[in-house]
């Protein structure tokens, strides 16, 4: 019984792995480190 549950769980993980994917979005700036712009960018990155 336990092996059937484990097999079902592993199968579901493999099926869902193709649909759940992360995207990486990188932004390069020339703004100084502690400027208002960078503070807002870091806050937005933390929220995402």
Image: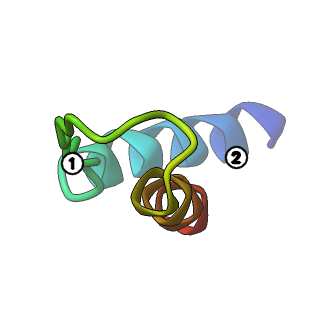
Q: Where is residue 47 in the image (x, y as percent from the top left)?
A: 58, 68
Q: Which residue is drawn at 49% across and 34% down?
A: 33
Q: Which residue is drawn at 20% across and 34% down?
A: 30
Q: Which colour scheme is used?
A: rainbow
Q: Which residue is drawn at 72% across and 31% down?
A: 3
Q: Give the mark toward the camera: 2 or 1.
A: 1
Judging depth in this view, the residue of 12 and 17 nearest the camera is 17
Which residue carries the number 2 mark? 5
Query: Is tag 2's residue or tag 1's residue first in the polypeptide sequence?
Result: 2
Give the answer, above or below, for where 40 lies relative to 4. Answer: below
Q: In this view, does 18 lie to the left or right of 20?
A: left
Marks 1 and 2: in contact by CB < 8 Å? Answer: no
Q: Where is residue 35 in the image (x, y as percent from the top left)?
A: 49, 51
Which residue carries the number 1 mark? 23
Q: Where is residue 13 in the image (x, y as percent from the top left)?
A: 44, 44
**Dot 1, how many residues are within 10 Å of its Cα: few (below 14), some (14-19), or many (20+)?**
few
Q: Distance between the residues labelled 2 and 1?
A: 31 Å
């Amino acid at each position: 019984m336990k092996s059937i549950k484990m097999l079902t769980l592993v199968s579901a993980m493999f099926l869902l792995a193709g649909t759940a994917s992360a995207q990486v979005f990188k932004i390069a700036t020339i703004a100084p480190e502690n400027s208002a712009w960078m503070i807002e960018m870091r806050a937005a990155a933390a929220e995402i």
